[in-house]
Amino acid sequence: MSIDFYWRLPTHGCHNSLRTSGYERGDWSPLQPGNIAPGLDRDGAVDGFTYIDHLGAIARAAESVGFQGGLIPSFPNTDDPWVISSLLARETSSFRFMIAFQPGFGNPVHIARMAASLQRATGGRLLFNIITGGGGPAQLWWGDSFAHDDRYGRTSEFLDIFRGVWESSDFSYDGRFYQLRKGGLPALFRREEFPEIWFSGSSDAALQTAARHADYYLSWLEPFDQLGDKFARVKERTAALGGEQKCAVRVDLVARPTEEEAWADIRAGFENVGEETRQRWRGQATDSVGAARQAALRPSDARRYDELIVAPNLWGGFNLLRGGPALGIVGSYEQCAAQLDDLIARGADAFILAGTPHLEEAYRVGEEVLPLLGRQVSALQAAAE
């Protein structure tokens, strides 16, 4: 069985280390000595190395060590992933661009035309991480006030039309959120490969939509038994509709030559967290089931890094050190590979991995961890059965 691996591109800047709190890379912090993209030359002038140059270096690094492509996030504090994909297409040759996209923020016919155009320009290197939003203030930032289940209903209709106009020159649709008459892409565009759909969400509404539309169901890392159960439910629902579903995991790694070195980085980063970050960590209003499942993994008043150890080599405080999911993998190269093997045995068909800083860790994970995969797969699969 072939397992796909993607890397994450930090379109909101990046830290020099998990031990630091500033975004020293990618121009999201004030320009000062030690910054990268842009940085300062020996005379104190801007060196001309831009944030897109840095993202290009990360994409090329990931491509060179075997990652199929990269997730390009989309948040209020990021550059737009469509623009980033276009800029990086000339920086790489086979690297695939996974655009994070909320369907409610675009017309499905227009987005289909954009996607087909990007497929033509890049030789079919586009795929989507479809997200439907976590509600609360973050959702209202986009001007979107739809309720949780309504957002998933809208997403489902959007994807119906997106595929319909890609596959037909005469497609009509009557839905609650969208109506279309005799829509369709030109024949030249319809010849392009339809993009893979990776779908995120943990609620029943999300799982139902994923079963209908997704090539891959994507989840943040959760305790392995819990995650395996979720994967089984997604695959069961898809099979009931006559389809076949693959599952993927989005997870950060701290992989070092020894376990002690890995936990030392975690401890140093945790001890550098300020009270303002802790307050944000305690959570904002959201109706995201996935975010609630992450929050349940850790105590909100933890004062020692080891209070957030969820299981051997699993730590629940990553969102204190950088934005994103809470749970990640910490350990030696061999231990990290074993954890990924365990996830494969429980139903994972693909991964979106990340590490801080993204450039150096792409090399580290690609060269030191991924080659170790598969050594325990037979034993783990037998145990799972």
Image: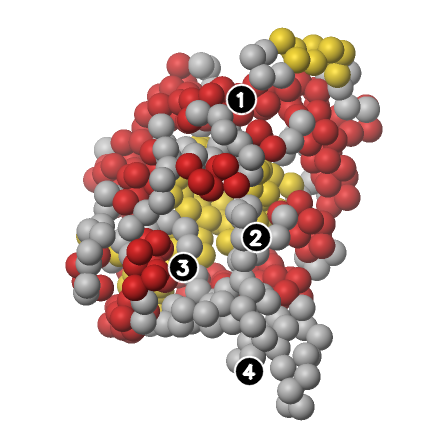
Residue 252: x and y in percent read 39, 55
Which tag, 1 or 3, sits closer to the chain's start? 1
Query: Label 1, on which residue?
Result: 154
Cα distance in 3D space between marks 3 and 2: 14 Å
Q: Position of residue 171 (x, y in %)?
A: 71, 12
Q: Residue furthest bottom?
A: 43
Say which residue label 2 marks. Answer: 78
* Within-10-Å neighbours for mark 4: few <14, some 14–19, many 20+: few
Q: Element at badge 3?
A: loop
Mark-to-mark CA distance, 4 and 3: 21 Å
Name the residue type under label 4.
Pro
Q: Secondary structure at mark 1?
A: helix
The answer to whether one can see residue 235 in this image is no
Q: In 3D space, how far apart are the residues under numbered discs 4 and 2 (Cα atoms)?
A: 23 Å
Q: Residues within 10 Å of mark 2 (few under 14, many from 20)?
A: some
Q: Residue 91's image quarter? A: bottom right
For label 4, the SS is loop
Counting residues from the start of the chain, the first of labels 4 and 2 encountered is: 4
Does the image show residue 58?
A: yes
Residue type at mark 2? Thr
Q: What x and y, as percent, mark residue 290?
A: 35, 37
User: Which residue is the site of mark 3?
Assistant: 322
Q: How far across and down, in percent of the image, does residue 172 sit?
A: 69, 10
Which amino acid does the dot numbered 3 rest on?
A: Arg
- Circles 3 and 2: CB atoms closer than 8 Å: no
What residue type is disc 1 on?
Arg
C-alpha distance separating marks 2 and 1: 24 Å
Name the residue beneath numbered marker 4: 33
Dot 2 or dot 1: first in sequence order is 2
In the drawing, does residue 376 fall left or right of residue 323?
A: left
